[in-house]
């Protein structure tokens, strides 16, 4: 009698927890995912699956399992994890029992959807840029933090892009700024008068505003660290009742989302953000649509 697939599953889990020393939670998860797969096969073939069943599986069988999971509402990321658990099981069968299943190699793993950018409301973004300086009593640090938040929200810079700026990178009023982004790619970013005003106020208090000095300095006179900025904003958002996703990067998301809702076109936003691909920028259209639907659900009497 050929060995049952369930018996092989038990052996696999013993190997996983014993020789591989996987955490008990990992063994439990793998066991549950494999039981789900074998349970599907039982219904799919009309009987208990055996070693021979696993050996002769077709790609269509595995796709049928994934399709059932998708129909049940299982997301791409979870289906990908289940498929990964099954692949590990098949590798074990091949190495320890000589059971080779080639069907899985022809299956494309479900791609997890990238989470939508989480923007702040206009009011919350304005509150941060207006009041972030209240987090400290030191005038220079107040001006520094305000100027930094204005750059993130008013120009859409990444936190590392802003912190890598030198004093000489700040243009004269009315002129755009050249920013070096990922892959050392440069882009031109317009600087709003309010942003320039905040930068000018900070530069008046900068301890050494020579062109080659870092623009944003920490307490020890070195280039400001991103972790310090994140902590400052984290403390500020909790004191002011802002959402937990109010981070430096959320200000960049807010810049793009608010531009889009104001009528800016995707190509322009792509250039301003420094995205290599338009598909990355297109995620903001989903954010805008989601916000529109939330307003509709909250306001329409038939929603």
Image (cartoon, rainbow, N blue to C red):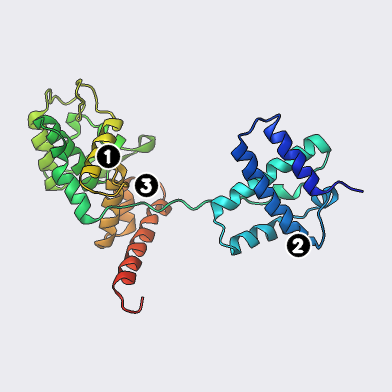
Question: Which residue matches tag 2?
Answer: 43
**CA separation, marks 1 and 3?**
27 Å
Q: Secondary structure at mark 2?
A: helix
Question: Which residue matches tag 1?
Answer: 234
* Viewer can see residue 53: yes
Work out whether 137 lies above or below 241. Answer: above
Work out whether 40 lies above or below 241. Answer: below
Query: Would residue 117 appear left or right of 73 to someone viewing this image?
Result: left
Q: Position of residue 44 (x, y in %)?
A: 76, 62
In the rendered image, the quadrant that contains the C terminus is bottom left
* Mark 1 / mark 2, whichever is N-terminal: 2
Query: Would residue 21 appear left or right of 2 to someone viewing this image?
Result: left
Do tag 1 and tag 2 residues touch (Cβ < 8 Å)?
no
Question: Which residue matches tag 3?
Answer: 275
* Mark 2 / mark 3, whichever is N-terminal: 2
Tell me which residue sits at (65%, 62%) in the image.
68
Badge 1, how many Cα within 10 Å: few under 14, some, many 20+?
some
Mark 1 or 3, closer to the camera: 1
Tell me which residue sits at (83%, 38%) in the image.
98
Badge 3, how many Cα within 10 Å: few under 14, some, many 20+?
some
């Amino acid at each position: 009698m050929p060995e049952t697939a369930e018996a092989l599953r038990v052996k696999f889990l013993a190997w996983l927890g014993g020789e591989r020393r996987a955490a008990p939670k990992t063994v439990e998860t793998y066991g549950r995912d494999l039981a789900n797969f074998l349970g599907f096969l039982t219904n799919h073939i009309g009987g208990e699956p055996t070693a021979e069943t696993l050996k002769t599986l077709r790609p269509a069988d595995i796709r049928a399992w994934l399709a059932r999971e998708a129909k049940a509402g299982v997301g791409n990321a979870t289906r990908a994890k289940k498929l990964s658990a099954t692949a590990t099981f098949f590798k074990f069968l091949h190495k320890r029992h000589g059971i080779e299943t080639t069907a899985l190699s022809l299956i494309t793993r479900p791609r997890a959807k990238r989470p939508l950018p989480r923007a702040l409301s206009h009011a919350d973004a304005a509150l941060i840029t207006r009041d972030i300086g209240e987090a400290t009593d030191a005038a220079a640090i107040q001006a520094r933090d305000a100027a930094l938040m204005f750059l993130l929200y008013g120009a859409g810079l990444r936190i590392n892009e802003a912190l890598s700026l030198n004093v000489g990178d700040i243009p004269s009023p009315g002129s755009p700024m050249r920013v070096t982004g990922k892959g050392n790619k440069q882009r031109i970013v317009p600087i709003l008068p309010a942003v320039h005003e905040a930068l000018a106020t900070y530069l008046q208090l900068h301890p050494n505003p020579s062109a080659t000095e870092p623009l944003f300095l920490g307490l020890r006179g070195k280039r400001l660290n991103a972790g310090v900025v994140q902590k400052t904003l984290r403390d500020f958002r909790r004191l002011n009742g802002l959402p937990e996703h109010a981070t430096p990067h959320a200000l960049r998301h807010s810049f793009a989302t608010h531009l889009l809702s104001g009528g800016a076109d995707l190509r322009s936003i792509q250039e301003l953000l420094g995205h290599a691909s338009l598909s990355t920028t297109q995620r903001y259209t989903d954010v805008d649509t989601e916000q529109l639907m939330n307003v509709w659900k909250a306001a329409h009497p038939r929603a």
